[in-house]
Amino acid sequence: MTRSDGNALGLHPRQLLRPGGPLYPSDAPRDVKVADHGRADADPAGLTIAVRLRGETVVWSDLMFPDREHGVVEEARFHLAQYLGEIERVHGVWR
């Protein structure tokens, strides 16, 4: 499972947020590396989340990071139209 890690560096938005890119949703779930340690000796998997499309909802799962109430966030859900709009918007910014 992915765990919060202050030493990991997020991958560049250009790498993750593009039409058809790793965070683009599809019916088939996939594991997406979103951060790594930037060192050759680091865990090659880095920080990875599972991304899948469930109807009109994009689901990120296999998360494990603290929430504001000292619990654990394990899953995040996004409305498909808004999610795709943000991918397009960010892609335009980083092009």
Image: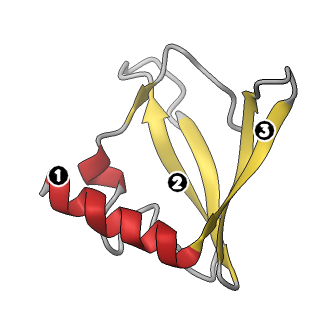
Q: Identify the residue shown where x is 12% and y is 58%.
A: 95
* Rendered view: 85 above or below 2: below
Q: Which residue is mark 1?
A: 94
Q: Position of residue 5 (x, y in %)?
A: 59, 20
Of marks 2 and 1, the one in the foreground: 1
- The kind of residue tagged 1 is Trp
Report how far apart the C-alphas of labels 3 and 1 lie in the structure: 28 Å
* Distance between mark 2 and mark 1 Cα atoms: 20 Å
Where is residue 7 drawn, in percent x and y? 49, 14
Residue 60 figure quarter: bottom right
Q: Earlier in the sequence, mark 3 or mark 2?
A: 2
Give the residue displayed 24% in from the left and 51% down from the top.
14
**From the viewer's perspective, is 72 left or right of 59?**
right
Label 2 near label 3: C-beta < 8 Å? no
Coordinates of residue 24 in the picture (x, y in percent): 45, 69
Q: Residues within 10 Å of mark 1 (few under 14, many from 20)?
A: few
Q: Are marks 2 and 1 in contact (CB under 8 Å)?
A: no
Whole-percent x and y of residue 11?
36, 38
Residue at numbered disc 3: 73
> Which residue shows up at 37% across the image and 18% down it?
39
| Residue 32's disc number | 2
